[in-house]
Image (spheres, rainbow, N blue to C red):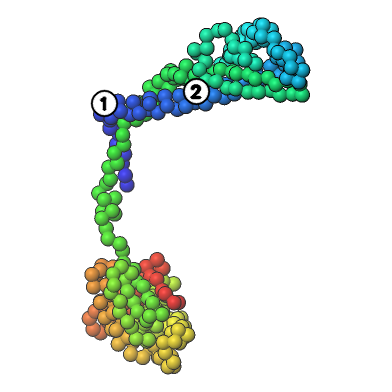
Amino acid sequence: MSKIKLRPRSPLKLAITFSLLLISLQIASVVGQYFAHQSSIHRAIDVVERRISLDSAFLDVGNETLNTPENRYAIGRYLERLNRVVEEKALPVVVSEIQGVQVKSDLSEYPALHRTTFENAEQTINISINSRAPINEVGLSWLGILLAFLIAPLFAFTSKKRRTQSSLEELVLPPKPKLVINLQEKTISNGIDDKVVTLQNKPLCFYTALVKYCIDNPNESLPPHKDVPHELMALANKCFGRLIELGHTKRKRPDFNANLDKTLSEIRAALDDVFSGYVDEKETYYPPRAQGEGSRSKQHSYALPSVKDDDIEIIGN
């Protein structure tokens, strides 16, 4: 289980964090201000162009068809009135020229130039519109500074996980071996290393059936001096039938009751080899040997009471 302990960051790291936050927020603010400024310029130009288009019928800008010149005095007066309206609406633009007539005011604050032309059946109107530079519209964001001060304390502490001894042991424990029975290859292995042992048909079928039987009947006793239970025999015969299907044998089914001690001995020898580096884990899959003679041996069982479904893998079942 993990424990989390908070510890304060060093002043240097906290200062760096605050600086990065402040710079990031200011950059985001400047980018936002820039695009907002560009959007306001486009809207302002649309408003001005629409106004001039509506006034063009009453504006003496000359006529190319009739070869009449523009009334420069009238256009100049119109420019002054139009720019006063633009200024009252706080639009970030100024109309600098209409039909070659330029405004007399200072345009140093409006360096960006936009040109457009209106055409109709009788006249063509050329217009120049200047807009404010983005540098005049973007600046330091006080909101960004405030947010940096509010967010920086959240990074004032760092977490350090402390693991208990049991969790450390879990990290360093090697993978747990499990019994792998491969009917396609007629082998058993531990699922970790390359140790693989090939079994003969009879011990392979009996052991596969024994594992399945003990999983389904964990409290069942299997004394070696009694006949093999009917359910266990059925499982062994079914496994042998599977070997026939896989093309490993054409012989008739063996008598799994006959020479049971020899069959168990072959199984134990194979398990000794496969689990040679995993003695404790081997006990789960190892049919116990008889201990002692006489009445003590009659109490013996070759069942596998500890084996569970998660402990095995059967390939080609």
Q: Residue furthest front?
A: 67
292, 243: nearer the viewer:
243
For the point 77% across and 24% down, the residue is 121
Q: In which quarter of the image is residue 82?
A: top right
Q: Give x and y (percent) for residue 254.
A: 40, 91
How many marks the image carries: the answer is 2
Query: Of tags 2 and 1, which is closer to the observer?
Result: 2
Residue type at mark 1 is Pro
Q: Give x and y (percent) for residue 73.
A: 67, 6
As drawn, the label of residue 33 is 2
Q: Quadrant of residue 298?
A: bottom left
For the point 25% across and 77% down, the residue is 273
Q: Position of 40 compared to 262: left or right? A: right
Q: Is residue 31 above or below residue 212?
A: above
291, 238: nearer the viewer:
238
Count neighbours of disc 1 (C-alpha within 10 A) and say few if under 14, some if 14 to 19, many if 20 or more: few
Q: For mark 1, what is the residue?
A: 11
185, 298: nearer the viewer:
185
Looking at the rendered structure, the secondary structure element under dot 2 is: helix
Q: In this view, does 124 lie above or below 291?
A: above
The answer, for residue 35, to whether it is visible in the render is: yes
Quarter occupied by the C terminus: bottom left
Q: Give x and y (percent) for residue 30.
A: 45, 24
Looking at the rendered structure, the secondary structure element under dot 1 is: helix
Calculate the distance from the C-alpha at mark 2 to the C-alpha at mark 1. 32 Å
Q: Which residue lies furthest to the bottom in this view?
A: 251
Q: Is residue 28 above or below residue 211?
A: above
**Of the residues under marks 2 and 1, which one precedes in the sequence?**
1
